[in-house]
Image (cartoon, rainbow, N blue to C red):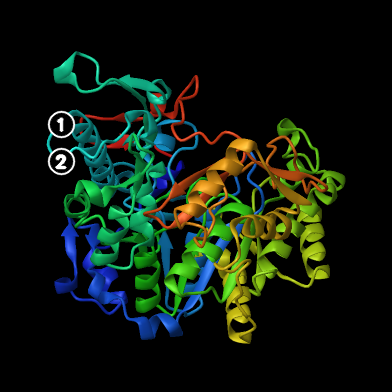
Amino acid sequence: MSDIEIAQKADAKHIKEIAQKLGLSEEHLELYGNSKAKLPLSLIDEEKVKRSNLILVTALTPTPPGEGKTTVSIGLTDGLNHIGKQATAVLREPSLGPVFGIKGGAAGGGHSQVIPMEDINLHFTGDFNAIEKANNLLAALIDNNVQSKVNNLGIDPRTVLWKRVMDMNDRALRNIVSGLGGKSGGVPSETGFNITAASEVMAILCLSSDFEDLKKRLGNIYIGDTYSGEPVFAHQLKAEGAMAVLLKDAIKPNLVQTLESNPAILHGGPFANIAQGTNSVLATKMGMSLSEYAVTEAGFGADLGAEKFLNIKCRAAGIAPKAVVVVATIRALKYHGGQSIDELTTENLGALEHGMPNLEKHIESIQSFGVPVTVAINHFVSDTDAEVEFLKDHCKNLGVEVALSSGWAKGGEGCTELAEAVVRSCEKGESNFKLTYELEDNTITKMEKVAKTIYGAKGVSLSKKAAAQLRRFEKLGFGKLPICMAKTQKSLSDDDKLLGRPTGFTFDIREFEIAAGAGFIIPIAGNMLRMPGLPAAPASERIQIDKEGKISGLF
């Protein structure tokens, strides 16, 4: 059966029953029908957060066949509950762009899914819509101030960086001209749209600790400059109050369930290459408050989502994982080892061996944070026994835990080996969390530490444009912020053609951006696409709904 067919045949429980597993009654829930609910922020208990076991799931460098972090995260959650541990999955919400584009949904796969799968992959509880509206309200306020003679801030429209967003892949909106139609239409200017997941409002929501922090961060959004060169922030437009009102429900995490009726909290979904790529601080802390084990994930490979989870999110939230799971597939390792994508299902121990350095580098990167690593082999039917044993032996020789993960085929039962390995790591108490850099380091030092330690680069270089931008941002007082490195997800380097474990390269910074509201500087390597386009044969062509309202084609 397809993913959606499996999900539709599931024996879904009323969300009140799932809440009871977390010790919650109906009065704690804001119900969205029978299968979804919002959770109040009052459920977060900092003392319980300190006692909980946070597990981060990441992966090696992504490849076209995919690695399955979400599937492993859900399978691990079910596996932990299967062996008698109280565990909750804490995941990101999917974006509609990939759902109708290439990737498909992000609710897991096979027998390791969260449900209601259709709702989660579509409008869900409206969080993305609220983020879109808050983002676009600020865009409208900026244009209005440029047009108006009352309380005019003198904003130079040529410097405005803020774009509108929509949760859809639409390449035609990347670069547009707005304000046409004469005086009544506003001031003509170049602008464009980003996809909603790329909005700084999304990053802000996912790093905020409460409503007051949310408003403060929204007010700190840097939008552009005046004609005299002075920076302009959202609070000068008195935008933060109304933006926060639009987010009053979106700030609350969402409770759903796995196919095996275990709790899952879904919230937020920022990009992992131009933002932090993880669910919200509030959702993670809520999962930790309500469970013995909280299983979360970070986007793309360990060099992107995991690095930002650890250096940005954990720093901001005051939390740390007890263990990290690095997802590896035989197919991905053979791809990094030079095997053709058309032949990845054919046994090739030589390509598998040549692909190992990529996994080794990600293991080393995670170990640099002082956190124990478990490698999860996300099992596919094409994997041969010889390949699986080779990978297991290799990991054991590296001194790391390794376990087979068969959640796609078997659900929680197929992830008990992985669950037991993770529990062993947590119970050993060997996590000694440390950050890659300190906030007191200057920005170049921070970049060099990340590039050398996490990517394996020999150093960092800045273009003239980047150097000038950095001097200005530091002059504005942003030099002590964390950095959010923006680079390709396809390689450890800044060149997406360099597979495996490249060495001897210099990491080139093309330009900088500032996300003053989210609270980080963004060094950009290469071109970061924030509004994807649809493929020649988009996934939307397969999606249908029948006369009974039953959806098909989602995956």
Q: Residues within 10 Å of mark 2 (few under 14, many from 20)?
A: few
Residue 148's disc is: 1
Q: Residue at x 43, y 54 (%)?
A: 113
Q: Residue at x 39, y 58 (%)?
A: 259
Residue 275's disc is: none
Kindly state the secondary structure of the residue where label 2 is placed: loop
Q: Residue at x 36, y 81 (%)?
A: 46
Q: Residue tagged by mark 2?
A: 151
| Disc 2 and disc 1 in contact, CB within 8 angstroms | yes
Instruction: Tell me the amino acid under the disc marked 2.
Output: Asn
Q: Is residue 84 visible?
A: yes
Q: Residue at x 83, y 69 (%)?
A: 397
Q: Position of residue 216 (x, y in %)?
A: 28, 60
- Indicate whether 388 appears above or below 212: above
Left or right of 408 in this view: 461? right
Work out which quarter of the rendered image holds the C terminus and state it.
top left
